[in-house]
Image: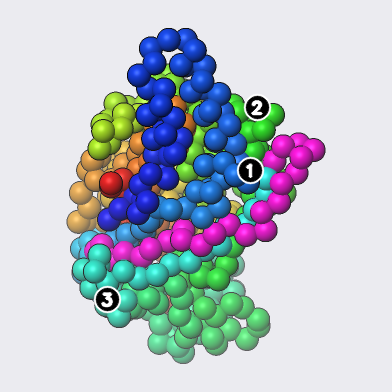
Amino acid sequence: MGCDRNCGLITGAVIGAVLAVFGGILMPVGDMLIQKTIKKEVVLEEGTTAFKNWVKTGTEIYRQFWIFDVQNPQEVMMNSSNIQVKQRGPYTYRVRFLAKENITQDPKDNTVSFLQPNGAIFEPSLSVGTEADNFTVLNLAVAAAAHIYPNPFVQVVLNSLINKSKSSMFQVRTLRELLWGYTDPFLSLVPYPVTTTVGMFYPYNNTVDGVYKVFNGKDSISKVAIIDTYKGKRNLSYWESYCDMINGTDAASFPPFVEKSQVLQFFSSDICRSIYAVFESDVNLKGIPVYRFVLPSKAFASPVQNPDNHCFCTEKIISKNCTSSGVLDISKCKEGKPVYISLPHFLYASPDVSETTDGLNPNEEEHRTYLDIEPITGFTLQFAKRLQVNILVKPSNKIQVLKRLKRNYIVPILWLNEVCIFSC
C-alpha cells in the first residue's frame, strides 16, 4: 500500500530537489536559499509543487473498516445483557482520489476556495471479505427514531410501525448496506415524508464536502493551508464558546518549518470539530526525517480532567454530569441522530462508557491517531486517522423491542482507519 506512486512528488521536488542542491551547504546562505525556495513552492497557487499535489493527491489513501458483529442480539433485547461483539475486518476502500472542484483564488484576501468530492471504491485484495458479507448490527432507524421522538404518544405510533414492519432492535445487513445505505422497512411505513434510506455514511458517493476557503500563503507562509471558513462560516454552530471554532488546516499539510514544541490544530468534518496533535517522537521514514504528532488522551478527557473540554460536554446523563471521558455526542451535527464518536475500542474512555459491551480490547498502538510530518515543508507524508462510530440506545416503555432494556447503551457499530503509508 503506497503513500505515493510517484514518491518524488510528495517528498517533493521541494524536499528532494531543494535539499539535494542545498543540503550539503553548511552556511547561512544555504539556509536562506532553502527557506526562500520552500516559501515559494508551498504556496497554493498554479505552478507550485504543493498546488499540484493539493488539487489531486498523488497518494493512495485508504479507509479501512472493522464492523462490530453482535453475537447475542436476543439476550440483549430480552434480558438487557451486555452486548457481545466480535470485530470483523478490515474491509478496505480507496478514498480521496477525486480532484478538488470549483477552485477559486481570491487575491483580495489571499485565499483559495474549493469543494472536496467524496468517493469510495472497494478494494477486494485489501479486504477480508466482500461487500455482500452479513453482519448483525443495531437497527439504526429504530434507535434513532426512539431518540428523536421521545414523546410517549409519538412512540406508541412508532411502535405500531416497527411491529408492522417486523423490525427489531437488531438487524442483519450487508457491509454495503450498512456503510452506504439501504431502504428501511420501518421508515417506509411512516405516513409523512421522511428519508427512508439509512446508512452509516449515507449519502457519500457523488457528494461533496465544503465549501472550504483556505489561505494560499501568498501574503504569509505561516498561514498556508489554514482554513479561513467552512461552508461560509468561521464557526460550526454545534458547540459553545471556542469549541465551536474552525481551527488549523485539514491535516494534509501544515505551514512549513514545523517545530516540535508546536500544537498542530486541524479541523475534521467527520467528527464535527477542530482537534489537535502534539509531538511524540522523531521517525525515520525511508530515509526522510519526520516528526510524529499524535492526538493526546487529554483531547478526549472529561472537563474534570481537562477543563478546556467543558464546551464539548452538551448533555449531563450519558456523560454522568460531564465526568466521563472518551466519547463525544455529535447529534447536533447529525440531524439529532444519537451518534457518539470515540477512538476505536473506546481507547482513553472512562470504564463506564464500555461497561455494557464485551469483546473490546483498546490498544494504543493500533487505535490512536498519528500524523508523520516532514518539518521543513509541513507536508503530512504518512498518517493513520482512527475513529469509532457509536449509537446511543435508551430503554422505552412504549416501544416493544426496547421495553426490556434496563439501562442506556452506547453501542459500537464500526471503527475506521483512514491511512496513507509512505512507500518508495
Q: Mark 1 points at which residue?
A: 45
Image: 376 above or below 380: above
Image: 405 above or below 290: below
State the count of labels. 3
Secondary structure under the numbered disc 2 in the rendered image: loop
Image: 366 above or below 125: above
Viewer-nearest residue: 88 or 328 = 88
Q: Do the residues labelled 1 and 2 touch (CB within 8 Å)?
A: no
**Over which residues does the magenta segment extend?**
89-111
- Amino acid type, mark 3: Thr
- Amino acid type, mark 1: Glu
Q: Name the residue under label 3.
A: 130
Percent coordinates x, y for residue 396 in the rendering: 45, 67
- Residue at figure coordinates x 59%, y 26% from the top left: 222
Image: 66 above or below 157: above
Find the distance from the CA under tag 1 to the CA under tag 2: 13 Å
Magenta span: helix, strand or loop, mainly? Answer: strand
Viewer-nearest residue: 406 or 408 = 408
Secondary structure under the numbered disc 1 in the rendered image: loop
Q: Name the residue under label 2.
A: 220
Q: Does the magenta stretch include residue 97?
A: yes
* Coloring scheme used: rainbow
User: Do we see residue 348 in this rendering?
Assistant: yes
Question: Disc 2 or 3, which lies upstream in sequence?
Answer: 3
